[in-house]
């Protein structure tokens, strides 16, 4: 039974994060444990290399190269 409660709490959390992002609230980039921020930056990387990309195991390299300072200032990582 405990796992059902954790699942429902997670669904509620994700729903609130999506709502925050859709409504464009000021803290939208922090929603979803920073997922929306990361995804938005990954979309930029996809535009840079749409055919072959960077490879899933190599994402950290271009992410840090292009967004490292911004990420550090914004989130501390």
Image (tube, rainbow, N blue to C red):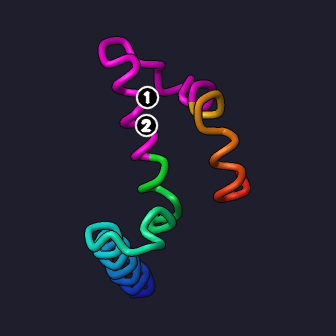
Residue that label 2 marks: 42
Task: Residue 33: give x, y in percent of width and height.
Answer: 52, 64
User: Label 2: few (<14), some or many (≥20) within 10 Å?
Assistant: some
Task: Residue 21: give x, y in percent of width and height.
Answer: 33, 67
**Residue drawn at point x = 63 percent, y = 25 percent:** 61
**Residue drawn at point x = 51 percent, y = 59 percent:** 34
Residue that label 1 marks: 45
Give the magenta range.
Answer: 39-62
Q: In the image, 16: left or right of 70?
A: left
Mark 2: secondary structure: helix
Residue 10 or residue 73, whichever sits in front: 73
Q: In the image, 50: left or right of 29?
A: left
Q: Which mark is residue 20?
A: none
Mark 1: secondary structure: helix
User: Label 1: few (<14), some or many (≥20) within 10 Å?
Assistant: some
Position above or below: 14 against 37:
below
For the stretch drawn in magenta, what is the main secondary structure? helix
Task: Residue 12: give x, y in percent of width and height.
Answer: 33, 81
**Magenta-colored stretch includes residue 12:** no
**Contact between labelled residues 1 and 2, with CB atoms less than 8 Å apart:** yes
């Amino acid at each position: 039974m405990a796992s059902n409660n954790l699942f429902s709490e997670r669904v509620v959390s994700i729903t609130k994060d999506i709502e925050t992002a859709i409504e464009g609230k000021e803290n939208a980039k922090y929603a979803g444990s920073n997922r929306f921020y990361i995804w938005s930056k990954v979309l930029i990387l996809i535009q840079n290399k749409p055919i072959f990309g960077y490879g899933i195991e190599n994402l950290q390299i271009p992410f840090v190269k292009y967004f490292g300072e911004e990420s550090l200032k914004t989130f501390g990582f």
